[in-house]
Amino acid sequence: MHGGGQALPVVRVHSGCVTGDIFHSLRCDCYGQLQAALDRIVASDHGILIYLPYQEGRGIGLVNKIRAYALQDQGLDTVDANVSIGAPVDARDYDLAARILQDLGQQNIKLLTNNPAKVEALTTLGINVAEQVSLIVAPNRHNRGYLKAKKERMAHLF
């Protein structure tokens, strides 16, 4: 509890994913992550979804994401594919998300994420992530390698 006895909000800062969120691609876990987050938010007393539509492909954009997909089809993992096309592994910026939370008066949150870099970025921007809440989405045969690379190469929790 904090200020006024209200529980900390459960917050998802979701990077938009056209292929996953709209077309339900099985290559990533974005759609499953979004649905799991919405379930948690709806079940909570106080929840917030911040949807960042311009962070496609961890911030590299849809065209570069498609280029990286082609390299993944040739055997590269998600990290090496981004690097091979000259893109950063993760180019996302969370400044807008932090400003939205500050505008809402929510600088203390429970963050729904498996990504410790997202926690660190929001913390650096003045948001107190009191708790990191993992979202576990079952892998499928199409995204197993992707999820493995996120865990092993990007320090994601799951």
Image (cartoon, rainbow, N blue to C red):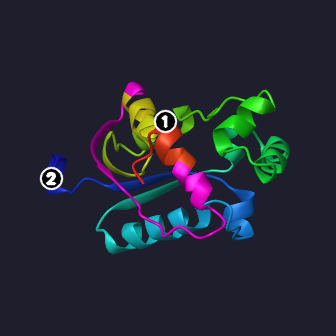
Q: Is residue 21 left or right of residue 111?
A: right
> Helix, strand or loop at disc 1?
helix
Image x and y of residue 51, in percent: 58, 53
Q: Which mark is residue 144?
A: none
Q: Visible in this render: residue 23?
A: yes
Q: Which residues are magenta?
A: 124-148
Nearest to the observer: residue 115 or residue 153: 153
User: Around disc 1, counting alpha carbons within 10 Å, would you say few (fewer than 14), some (14 to 19), or many (20 or more)?
Assistant: some
Q: Quadrant of the C terminus?
A: bottom left
**Mark 1 = which residue?**
99
Q: Is residue 79 left or right of residue 106?
A: right
Task: Please state the horizontal and vertical placement of residue 154, each as a whole percent of the image.
Answer: 51, 38
- What residue is at 36 percent from the left and 56 percent from the top? 134
Q: Position of residue 10 (x, y in %)?
A: 34, 57
Judge whether residue 135 is colored magenta: yes
Q: Residue at x 49, y 35 (%)?
A: 99
- Crowd tier of the residue under label 2, counting other residues whose Cα lies within 10 Å: few below 14, some 14–19, many 20 or above: few
The one nearer the camera, 146 or 5, is: 146
Element marked by disc 2 = loop
- Give the amino acid type for the residue marked by disc 2 in the picture: Met
C-alpha gap between disc 1 and disc 2? 22 Å
Q: Residue type at mark 1?
A: Arg
Left or right of 20 in this view: 69: right
Whether the magenta-drawn stretch holds residue 151 is answered as no
The answer to whether 74 appears left or right of 83 in the picture is right
First in sequence: mark 1 or mark 2? 2
| Residue annotated with mark 2 | 1
Q: In the rendered view, would you say 128 is above or below 157?
A: above
Residue 54 seen anywhere in this rendered image of the structure: no
Q: Residue at x 43, y 43 (%)?
A: 101
